[in-house]
Image (cartoon, rainbow, N blue to C red):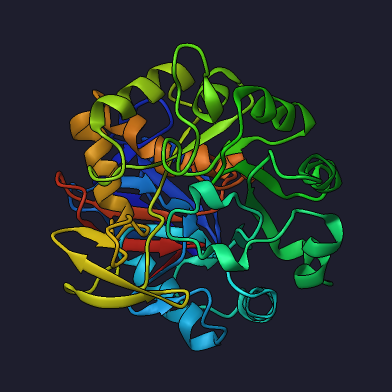
Amino acid sequence: MKKCIINGKIILHNEIVEKNVFINGDKITEISDKMPDNEEIVDAQGLYVSPGFVDVHTHGRGGSDTMYPTFEDLNTISKSTLKTGVTSFLPTTMTMPVEDIKKAIENIAINKDKVEGGQILGAHLEGPFFNKKYKGAQPEECMILPTVDNYLSFVGENQHVIRKISIAPELEHSIELIEYLKDKNTVVSLGHTNATYEEAQAAIDAGATSGTHTYNAMTPLTHRAPGVVGAVMINDSVYAELILDGVHVNYAAAKALLRAKGKEKVILITDSLEAAGLENGKYLLGNQDVYVKDGEARLIDGTLAGSIVCMNVAVRNAYQHLGLKLYEAVNLASYNPAKSLGEEFLGEIKEGNIADIIFFDEDIEIKKIMIKGNLK
């Protein structure tokens, strides 16, 4: 089916234009002033027309979590995240017993192409290869060493599903695992780590290309010990995940990261929990109680435990607080995460790309969504 989006403000990579977007099947075929002929008309009614957002780090939403290994839970996350403008995502596991992680991965492998909302690109394994000193909300009793054998014990035959893994690079055997994953379409990200700058740099030299929720749960940048934050900041090959909910990272620190990394290397993530999209109350993260109040999710001891931010709100925060143009803020949630995963045809409204498109107003409230050329 051929379609044409008219009357929209089209958010391209480097500008916003008032043109028509032609779609054939699941692909964008043309962006021009040409008038539609025999295409089905999609009237944007003056809304912004944006590439769909890509969330590379989300545990859950709408009462479901990646660690609940059912189709229904994945589908709930998929449909809930779509409402926030996320058209593709990586359901993210957490540090739990190996058997639980294995079940979650198997569930993603079986059901990733069956969900009805945002599309699943694969899995992000957050743990269990972490340092207890920077455990955050990850249970330390389930943390193990990052050996290839330990990794394969829960990944098994499903390596093709693993698109990203967060590890602490100072742990014994981590470099071997990074080198093992280098040619397997899996991004290695540094997170929940007590690494020195030198240990982080060794991991980057071995093939790590990402920092997990930068600033949070990692050694900070100081003038004599640059830490993992320093290593993430100065390496051009490394993308920096950022939770921009106004709670996890001060906006001035977010600006500093943006200046250090440049606008092409910062990735907005939600790191959202099952509580995201729901009201205040008590929820779960893995096997731990999480208390949500006043826009924050914390363990009983006060530790921040992921976020409840929506991606469209994170983009709004980037636009309002980081001094970015709107298309630049959108890139942080679409183009950059897609490129970080090597997804060539996602994250940008461009001829030849997949027609994953969202429509939003001046407040970046999502009004309409298209996945692979089909309105949802």
Q: Residue at x 42, y 35 (%)?
A: 215
| As drawn, 301 above or below 153 | above
Q: Seen in the image, is 365 located left or right of residue 185?
A: left
Q: Quadrant of the C terminus?
A: bottom left
Which sits in the foreground, 147 or 7? Answer: 147
Q: Residue 87 appears at what percent x and percent y?
A: 45, 60
Q: Residue at x 60, y 44 (%)?
A: 352
Residue 324 in view here = no
Location of residue 274 by image quarter: bottom left
Q: Residue 230 appears at what percent x and percent y?
A: 52, 22
Q: Residue 196 appears at what percent x and percent y?
A: 61, 27
Residue 323 in view here = yes
| As drawn, 235 above or below 117 | above
Q: Residue at x 65, y 52 (%)?
A: 165
Location of residue 305 by image quarter: bottom left
| As drawn, 86 above or below 274 | above
How many badges with numbers are in the image?
A: 0
